[in-house]
Amino acid sequence: MKLCITLLIGVLFANCLAQEISVPDSLLLNSPLKTDKTLVVCLSPVESFRSSFETAMQQKLQFHGIHTETSKRYLPIALKQEAATKNELKKLIKSLPQSGFDKLIISAMSEVEHTKIDAEGYFGDFDLFHFNTYLYKVDEDGSSLLWSICLCIYDYQVPLLTVKDFAKAIVDKMIEDGALKTDEVHELKLFNF
């Protein structure tokens, strides 16, 4: 009996060694891999908002197959939207191609508008926040604007929104406008164990 088991294990082992592994043609690369990288920057004086917004954008974009990094490593100190930070931002943009980035997403609160009527026609004293996001292509020659959006949010809406809502609205609009292809969505597969 021991001899039969030993022979069976020997045959199986020899069979495993003799099999040739072949890669299906569908898995072979027809072109070299691209290393697209996008840096996500939020210009905010509130560090917690900056980091949570950048992380939410990173997660949303990575779900769509976009390799992203947050600005924390490249801008340890948050840049506020002021004239003095323009030079810091220009230095950052110039350094991006050397760091392997080819795209840059910048988001910031651009202005606060005081209004007496809201979008639904209600009268009162409202603050309307303009939250802008810009997508730039960056290379050795400089940068060029590819896409932009302005989210307008009333002061009474702010407590109801999360940074994930901001990120979802921006990425959904990118898809709608064609700045992000919908076929880049990674399928969520559920497995039963």
Image (cartoon, rainbow, N blue to C red):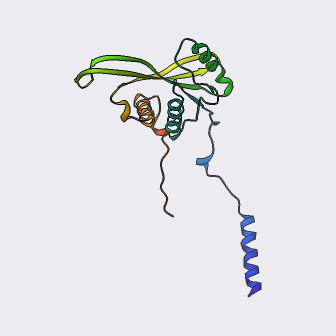
Residue 14 percent location from the top left of the image: 76, 70
Who's the residue at 74% across and 84% down the image? 4
Residue 114 percent location from the top left of the image: 33, 16
Above or below 33: residue 144:
above
Location of residue 168 by image quarter: top left
Above or below 149: residue 1:
below
Location of residue 31 by image quarter: top right
* Residue nearer the viewer, 84 or 13: 84
Residue 42 percent location from the top left of the image: 52, 26
Residue at the far bottom in the pictured view: 1
* Residue nearer the viewer, 75 or 123: 123
* Residue nearer the viewer, 152 or 137: 152
Above or below 11: residue 190:
above
Who's the residue at 48% across and 41% down the image? 185
Which quadrant would the N terminus be assigned to in this image?
Answer: bottom right
Looking at the rendered structure, the number of numbered marks drawn on it comes to 0
Who's the residue at 22% across and 24% down the image? 122
Residue at the far top in the pictured view: 83
Residue 7 percent location from the top left of the image: 76, 79
Who's the residue at 61% across and 52% down the image? 24
Q: In the picture provided, is 11 more to the left or to the right than 72?
A: right
Q: In the picture provided, is 167 more to the left or to the right than 69?
A: left
